[in-house]
Amino acid sequence: MRVITATMAVVGISLTSVASAGDPSLFASTIEPSAALAPTLLTFLFVMGREIVKDVEDLPGDHACGARTLPDRLGERRALAIALGFFVLFAALVPWPYHLQIFGRPYLWTYLLGVVPLLGVAVLLMLRDASPANLWRVSWILKLDMLLGVLVFWLGRAR
C-alpha cells in the first residue's frame, strides 16, 4: 500500500505540473504552499478513487495470479465504498482552490458544470453495477474526466 500511495502522490504532482502548463510561478517559493497543495490533493483524491475502481475491475485477473489488492483484502463493496469516499471528498474540495484565489471563475464553473457531473455519472454507474465490464466503462469515463480536469487547471489559472 505504501508503494501505491507514493505512486499516486507522484502522479498527482506530475499532473499538477502538466496543469501548470510550464508556468513555474504556480510552484514559486513566493506564493503559499497551498497553491501547489490544492491541485495536487485534488488530483491525488481523484486518481486514488479511479485506481481503486480499476483494482475492482481487475479482481478476477488478480485472483488468477495471486495478487493481493485492496478489493481482494476488503471485498469489492468495501473497496468501491472507499473509492466513493475519495470521489466525495474530491467533489467537496473542488471550490477550495477558487476560494484561495489560485484559480479563477473559469476553473470553478468548468469543474462544477463539467468535471463533477461527469464524475457523478461514473459514480452512479459504479454503484449500479460492479461487473468488470461496467467498471471498465466507468474507468474510461474517469480517464476522460481526468483529462478534462487537467484542462480545467490550465484554463482556470488566476491571471
Image (tube, rainbow, N blue to C red):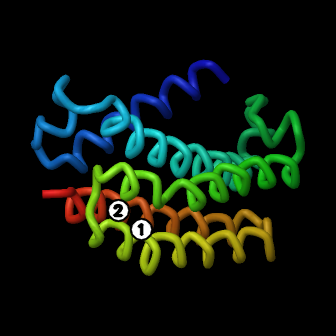
Determine the residue positioned at 31% across, 66% down.
Answer: 107
Residue 58 rendering spot, x and y as whole percentages: 68, 49
Residue 93 rendering spot, x and y as whole percentages: 54, 54
149 lies above or below 68:
below
Residue 11 rendering spot, x and y as whole percentages: 40, 36
- Give the labeled residue for mark 2: 147
Determine the residue positioned at 72% across, 57% down.
Answer: 84
Q: Between residues 69 and 82, which one lies in front from this camera angle?
A: 82
Determine the residue positioned at 72% across, 63% down.
Answer: 132
Q: Secondary structure at mark 2?
A: helix
User: Do tag 1 and tag 2 residues touch (Cβ < 8 Å)?
Assistant: yes
- Give the labeled residue for mark 1: 144
4 lies above or below 94:
above
Q: Between residues 132 and 78, which one lies in front from this camera angle?
A: 78
- Report crowding for label 1: few under 14, some 14 to 19, many 20 or more residues within 10 A (C-alpha): some
Q: Which of the image's four quarters has the C terminus?
A: bottom left
